[in-house]
Image (cartoon, grey):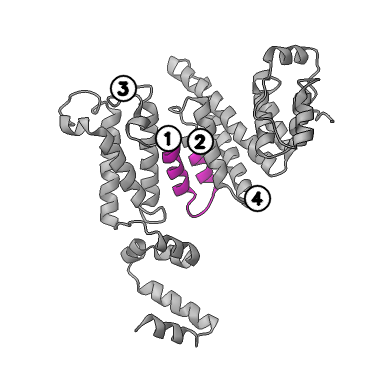
Amino acid sequence: MYVKELRSILKQYDEEKAKKLVVEIYKSIPKKVREEKNIDLLIEDVDKFLVDKKNPIKTIGVEKAKKIIKDANNFTVSASMGFYASPNKYVSKKVRMAWRNEVKRHIKNLNLILPTSTYGDEATVVLAEIYDLLNIAKYETIFSTNDVFNAIKMDRDYIFDLIVSRVFYKEVTDEKVAFVTDVCFAYSVRNIKVKYFLTDIIKSKIKTQDEVAVVLDGLAMLQKDDEKILNEQLSKKSSKSTLEVDYLIGKKKDVAELQIYFYAKAGEIDKATKVYMKYFGTSSKYVYILLNMYKQLDLKKEWLATYKSIKNKSKIYEYIDEENKFPRYVVIDAKTIDDRIKKGDYPYLNGVTPKI
């Protein structure tokens, strides 16, 4: 039967008959073929399926997917044990010297496994493990250089974006939010500026207010889980537990910054302020969190109110009034702020929103 004939026949079908037809056709397609042809996506979102069809991505079968994951797992284990850093009997010199190509090959192959397929989630987890390994390599000798992202000609942001896109491919859930946030604030990611770039990627994927609500649930769940781990580590007395405690305290503040952003995005400024006070209090060095949040959300009134609470006089006021836009940057004198805190002259961070 030609497509033209099929369309002609379908015109005669009512809605109920069409539904039965689709169900029976779906049942007749072998599971392996459904995964290879991404039939589930066709049914769930035909428009997206057609867009993807115009820009085809090479797909692979179940057996090949299992082999790709196994190979990538073996690579991460070998690399983490130092087998790509120095001569050994497990990884040949030829393979060891070609570690850059190995990394790129595994990233490319893992991304060929569709997120919605049988092994999609597993492929995403392994991809995240490789990403974590590359971050660790900046501080530990895992490969022949510490500048790994430059060496493989791939940006850290690009790989993290791949991971987040795969995780949120079908839907945003609280478990998925907790997962990508864990990856974002992993122990191996220690640069503050890098964390900001990574959180921007997470923020860019959240489009609706329903998704914002789910994100807040996921972040709250992560905070609760980390609090439990933190309490367990605090009960121990070892140098290892001390490092873990320091990391968890820092991570909880990182997660709190995301909570503040999304509470504000949901219009719940009071809850955003409450989280700020819980994790940052009146410490002057964290004022930038509020200013950045308001700037990102285009809340000029709130930004100006917070800024006025730390600087009585400034040309910034006139600039915002006249230009109706935020300044590119501001310089905050921490010592001046600390002096004002001691005098009790810091209304916003004492829980009272200043009036303009």
| Callout in the foreground (1, 3) | 1
Q: Secondary structure at mark 1?
A: helix
Rendered residue at 21%/30% (across/down): 97
What amino acid is found at the position of numbered circle 1 in the picture?
Arg
What residue is pinned by disc 4? 209
Q: Nearer the viewer, mark 2 or mark 4?
A: 2
Which residue corresponds to the image point at 45% horizontal and 86% vertical from the top-left?
Answer: 8
Looking at the picture, which amino acid does disc 3 mark?
Thr
Asked where in the image residue 296 lies, by quadrant, the reply is: top right
Instruction: Report how far apart the C-alphas of labels 1 and 2 lie in the structure.
Output: 9 Å
The image shows residue 141, relative to residue 177, as above or below, that is above
Q: CA distance from mark 3 to mark 2?
A: 24 Å
Q: Position of residue 238 (x, y in %)?
A: 45, 15
Label at residue 252: none
Vertical side of 169 occupied by 154: above or below: above
Closer to the N terminus: mark 3 or mark 2?
3
Residue 165 picture location, percent across and down: 47, 47
